[in-house]
Structures are given as structure tokens and as C-alpha cells.
Image (cartoon, grey):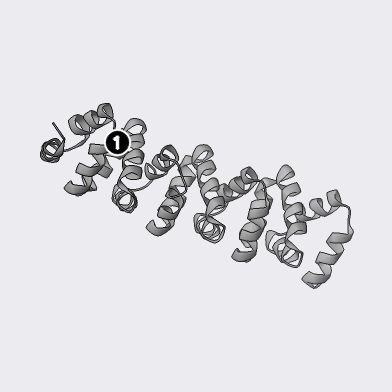
Amino acid sequence: MAPSKAAALLRSMKAPEAVLMLQKMDPTKAALLLEEMDAESAAAYLASLALTDPDQMAAILACMDPAKAAMLLALLEQSTAAEACATMDISRAVKLLELVESSLACGLVIELGSKHPSKMKSIVAGMTVAQVIGLVRRMNADEAARLLALMDPSSANEVLISMETDKASAIMQCVVTGFRESAAGIMACMSQPTCNEIVKVMDVSVAAVSVTELLTPIKAKNVLGTMPG
């Protein structure tokens, strides 16, 4: 049966029956059916399916055309969309996060980092630095720190140096406070001038930790030399 005809048949069923059929169907075939529907109807079926079989819902989304899947992801509850991304393979999750609106991508990344940190670490590793910069610009300092702590230090440093000094310092302060090992790695990748500017704006207690525990002796000495008084 042609996908368009099968989609029409699915729409003619009662919702519970249609969802049950999607649950039992091969994900690739189910994806073709939903692609024939308007976005609101397809998203409604996926939302219902997520309540009974979230793995099947994620598998269907993963089989869809990425642009269509991103459109449907935006119509789902954020928690449902995040769980779908957590179930997909890394490359597909990265692609969908690239295609959705940046505000939604930011929300999904925050939720994934909170509920699935190991998966989020793999997803972040698959993103370009430019993608991460776009997300960090929409995050508060604590959220950004959690994201940077998942990255390799060199890439995290690239993200930081793209920010204004005050924001970079606020983020780094949260990294030092909550993720000291990551902070040491990021600071080791910083140039001396960048390190000077970021530490100089930190709260005194956090700056002290940075200088005494995280920086190399030479870098710490040079930072101290730039401090007023």
C-alpha cells in the first residue's frame, strides 16, 4: 500500500488503535506514514506513542527525513523530545539538534545533560565548536559550565575565548567550583592573556583556588602580576 493511502487509513482509525499500529510497525515504514501527515497530527501520534513505547517513538523519529523529524521534535514536550534524542544514535541526535531552533536545542541539551550526562558527552563530542558556542550564548553560567565540563579542554577553551570576558569569567568560575578537574584542563589550554583577564574578574575565593591549585606555577605567577594592589 502506498504511504499516502496508508497514512489516510491510519488517520481514519481511533487514536489508540492508530498508536498501537505504529507501535507494532517497522520504524522505517511508520516514519514514511507520518511523513505523509501534517506535522501536528504526526506529532500527536508520536506523543501518544511515547507514553507506551518511547523506544519505538525514538526509532521512528530517527528513520524520518531529518528536517521533518526536527519539525516534529519541536512540537513535542521538551522532556519527550529529550528522551527521544537520548535513545537515538549520536549522529542523528547531533543532526536534529543542529536543525531545531537554537532555543529548543539549548533546552534539550540542558535536559539531556541533567538526565543523561554520558549520552550528552557523546553528543557534544559530535558537535562543532560553532554549534556549542551558539548554545552557550543562550545559557546561564551554571548551565554553560556543565556543558563545557563535558567537552575536551581544548574545545571548551575555544568556546570560552569566543565569549565576552565577563561571561567567560562567570562560566569559568562555575567550572572551577563544580568541575575542578575540567577547570584545570581548560586553564592549561588558555593563553596567558586570556587566563589573566578571566581570573581577574572572578570572585576572590575562586580566583585564589585557580591560582593556588589549578594553574601551573609560571602561569599563576603571571596572573598574580596583573592583579591590582
In the depicted structure, whether residue 125 falls above or below residue 147: below
Q: How many marks?
A: 1
Percent position of residue 111, x then y: 54, 41
**At x 55% / y 61%, what residue is drawn?**
99
- Quarter placement of the C terminus: top left
Say left or right for 61 vs 156: right
Q: Looking at the figure, which quarter contains the N terminus?
A: bottom right
Question: Is residue 174 visible in this depiction of the protein?
Answer: yes
Report the residue marked by disc 1: 181
115 over 127 or under it: above or below? above
Q: Pinpoint residue 206: horizontal percent, then vertical percent.
A: 28, 30
Of 30 and 129, the residue lying toward us: 129
- Residue 30: which quarter of the image? bottom right
Identify the residue at image location x=84%, y=60%: 10
How far across and how far down the image is residue 207, in percent? Answer: 24, 32
Question: Which residue type carries mark 1?
Answer: Glu
| Element carrying mark 1 | helix
